[in-house]
Each structure stands twice: as C-alpha cells, then as structure tokens.
Image (tube, grey):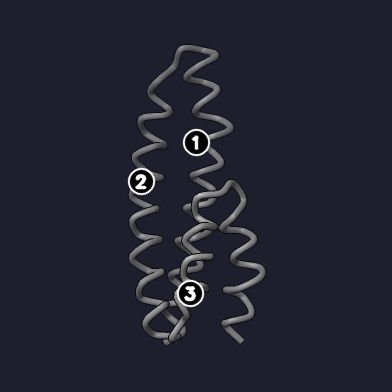
Amino acid sequence: MKSSMKAFRLVALLEGISFLVLLFIAMPLKYMMNMPLPVRITGMVHGVLFIAFVFYLMQVKSEYNWSIRKTFIAFLASLLPFGTFVLDAKVLKPEMK
C-alpha cells in the first residue's frame, strides 16, 4: 500500500518542480527572449506529470480512504506554485508514518 503513496509523492514533487520551471524559467524565456521552445517542451512534460498526479491522487484517495475535502485540497495544491511541496510536508509525509 505504501508504494502508491511513494509514487504519488514522487510525481507530486516532479509536478511541482516542472510547474516552477515553466513559470519562472520557460515563460520568461518565451516572453523576454522570444524563445517559445522551452515553454512547449516544459509545458508538455508538466502536462504529463499533472495527469499522472491526478491519476495517483485518485489511487491514494481510494487506498487510504481520503475524504473529498482532503482530496480536493491535494488537487488544489497542484494548481498553486509551491503547493505540492507544502502538500508533501503537511499531508503526504505524515501519512507515510
């Protein structure tokens, strides 16, 4: 059972990193340096990781009997910069104990 939580934590952290790279590196390159390719590549990677995040979120919700509220908060964290890091520290890491 813990393997799905480990996978979810990994995907959540990677999704958070890809979101920050997209926001703070790729987007400035696109709009300040007229380089759209980094957004295209990072955006695609981030999109795949976001879909994996939602997939694992549903799997963890089912296996750990998470409430709708807890699941919604976890989903909301994926939409906010640095949200997945807070989610990991406050919710996911304590859940592993």
SS for dot 3: helix
The answer for how far apart the CA atoms under marks 2 and 3 are is 20 Å
Please name the residue that numbered disc 1 is placed on.
Answer: 22
Q: Nearer the viewer, mark 2 or mark 3?
A: 2
Q: Is residue 31 left or right of residue 4?
A: right
Quadrant in the picture for the N terminus: bottom left
- Near mark 2 (Cα within 10 A), the count class, few <14, some 14-19 or many ≥20, is some
SS for dot 2: helix
Q: Is residue 27 left or right of residue 53?
A: right
SS for dot 1: helix
Residue 95 placed where, x, y %? 58, 82
- Near mark 1 (Cα within 10 A), the count class, few <14, some 14-19 or many ≥20, is many
Residue at 47%, 71% (x, y): give it: 71
- Sequence-first tag of 3 and 1: 3
Q: Which image quadrant is residue 43 in?
A: top left
Quadrant in the picture for the C terminus: bottom right
The answer for how far apart the CA atoms under marks 3 and 1 are is 24 Å
Please name the residue that numbered disc 3 is placed on.
Answer: 6
Residue at 56%, 41% (x, y): give it: 20
Residue 13 placed where, x, y %? 53, 58
Residue at 33%, 55% (x, y): give it: 51
Q: Which image quadrant is residue 61 in?
A: bottom left
Q: Is residue 62 above or below residue 10?
A: below
Residue at 57%, 83% (x, y): give it: 96
Q: Is residue 8 left or right of residue 25?
A: left
Callout 2 amino acid: Gly
Please name the residue that numbered disc 2 is placed on.
Answer: 47
Callout 1 amino acid: Leu
- Sequence-first tag of 2 and 3: 3
